[in-house]
Image (cartoon, rainbow, N blue to C red):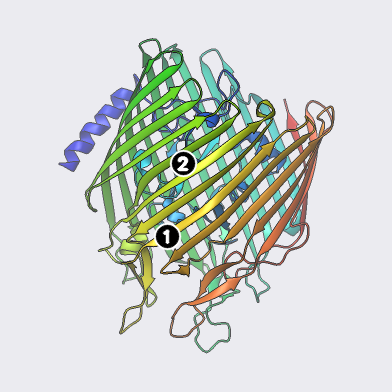
Amino acid sequence: MYKTSVSWLAISLAVGLATSAHAQGDPSVPSEDAAGNAIVVTASRSGDGVAVRNLPASVTLLTADDLQQRQTRIVSDVLRDVPGVAVNRQIGGLTQIRVRGSEANHVLVLIDGIEASDPFQGEFDFSSLIADEAAKIEVLRGQQSSLYGSDAIGGVIHYITLTGREAPGFSARAEGGSFGTYSGGARAAGYSGTFDYAVSGSVYGTDGTPLARNGSRDIGSTNVGASAKLTWTPAPNLKLTGVGRYSYTDADANNTENDPSSPLFGYIVDSPGTYYRNEAFYGLLRGELSLADGRWQTALSGQFADTTRKSFADGDFDFGNKGRRYKGTLESSYRFGSDTVVHRVTGALDFEREEFENTTPSAFVFQGRRSTENWGFVGQYELTIDDAFSAGASVRRDENDRFADTTTWRAQAGYRLPFGLRVRGAYGTGVKNPGYYELFGYSDGRYIGNPNLKPEKSKGWEAGVDQEFADGKAVIGATYFDSKLKDEIFTIYPAPDYVATPDNRSTLSKQHGIEVFASARPIPNIKLDLAYTWLDSKENDIREVRRPKHIGSVNATVFSDDERFSGTLTMRYNGRMTDVAYTDPSYTPVRVSLKEYVLVNLAADYRISDAISVYGRIENLIDEDYEEVFSFATPGRAAYGGVRVRF
């Protein structure tokens, strides 16, 4: 049955892409609507942008200006400024993002509309994502499985490079600084008639700093990224889009001391000759056909993700894996009503095939391929009345050849009062299928997968208020959320061998909290952005790891009258949190406390001429000594400077 279905889908994609197609979260949609309102594409499967001010869901948009003013080089750093988001960055290891107390693999990550998570890891490693020269980020929080299926329990993070029409011209930058760090990027973009293009490339390299708390070995890395986005509009009602992306990481790494007689047992220790290389290719083809004077849009897309991971010890290949994802999407959306009452109905069909191959050279490891196929059927309804009331509902049925079929849904509504106060609320459910490592992974004597795992399931609600001031020059908002997770996957150590293996909990994991944000441009010379999160995330009344109770950030940017100069002060607070350490020779996990910390960055940019700018920044200005993951050291104070050209 599935082979026949796949063949039919492949033929449909090939024909459809030559005529009409589209994809979830169209990355070629502009960042603003005709009225100048900021819009996002991730919150709807229709392919149309939705104005942030009218969306009855929790969403944050980080613009290209935000990323440039804060001089973002590693994308995970700027995500610290989003309410509800916690970042755990391991230099020389996995960088994880948690949203609203969910696990890192509960967050769906899209890059220009492409599902980017590693099929082996079951999540996206943010250490590999370096910032492009012109990009924006949409963060949609709350259960979104009714739109996107598995992985979207905590929300969706969508990283989008700008089109040639949004940011035309040529730009390039080069910088250097502390710890032997160098960084550079170039972008060429533009449009002519019906054709739009944007091509960019970035590199970030460093000699690094000691990673082990008690070590002296510098952990260096080199990251390379390249992206291309092409859009062709051969007719007013037909648009074709292609996206390609490549990333490569070559980085040193350290291991955990596994000698029970060592006083550093369970700690990260210097491991000369240990390093890894990760490589990923992503691609998407899509087109969109618009009929009935633009009211009816039909679309079809195909995309893929191909990831390869290799780790080395003493120069020899130690372990690795490959993961592939092929995905096809058919969407059709119809808009009807009047100028004041707008209805939109959308139907979508997703087919996804994931493949996994373990390449570890060990007789104990299964080295064949395994795969999973999933069909998703989506229905969505959206309503807007008088730019004041908005509501929506979505439902999705997933039919999977490995796990039990499941249905998820979400309903949301919001209303803006005449004096600028908007109230909103939502309820939704989510699902997360186990990853291949959890199912079939193996590490001799330390870990064995569990093929009998069940998917994790979530349900939750939120209620929020937003208030605009001074004709939109300032906005503040607050949201309360409450979620429960069932069948959470965790690690057990069964007798008699006490080898780690995953299992499903029989108890509920609960998360609730408050998100607060404020954004203001009181005068043209000053821009302020604030975010704060209070989170209570527990399982059996025990606080879950790497989820601080308090997180906050402040970004203040000042501009000169002629806007040639800008300076940005960034302060990011991460409260005390718990982690797990394996410092007991019996391999029994020990809970440890990681102290709170504040990171202060200062960035400045001066435009010498219309074409040339110089800039610089200081990171960790107060030289904070902190850990985001147990026994992983972090860099101290650092300074960087560079030059940028634009034509």
What mark, if any, has residue 110 been given in the picture?
2
What residue is pinned by disc 1? 510
Closer to the camera, 404 or 204?
404
Question: Which residue is outermost to the bottom?
Answer: 261
Give x and y (percent) for residue 315.
52, 67
Using the rendered view, name the quadrant where residue 638 is placed: bottom right
Report crowding for label 1: few under 14, some 14 to 19, many 20 or more residues within 10 A (C-alpha).
many
Q: Is residue 108 above or below residue 253?
A: above
Of the residues tagged 1 and 2, which is closer to the observer? 1
Report crowding for label 2: few under 14, some 14 to 19, many 20 or more residues within 10 A (C-alpha).
many
Question: Mark 1: which secondary structure?
Answer: strand
Three-letter code for the amino acid on which mark 1 is drawn: Lys
Q: Is residue 535 above or below residue 175?
A: below
Q: Is residue 430 above or below residue 60?
A: below
Cβ atoms under marks 1 and 2 closer than 8 Å: no
At 67% from the left and 45% from the top, the residue drawn is 530
Is 152 left, or right, of 397 in this rendering? Answer: right
Q: Gap between marks 1 and 2, in whole Å?
A: 26 Å
Give x and y (percent) for residue 68.
69, 38
Closer to the camera, 544 or 223?
544
Closer to the camera, 127 or 81?
81
Which quarter shows the N terminus?
top left
Three-letter code for the amino acid on which mark 2 is drawn: Leu
At 34% from the left and 66% from the top, the residue drawn is 507
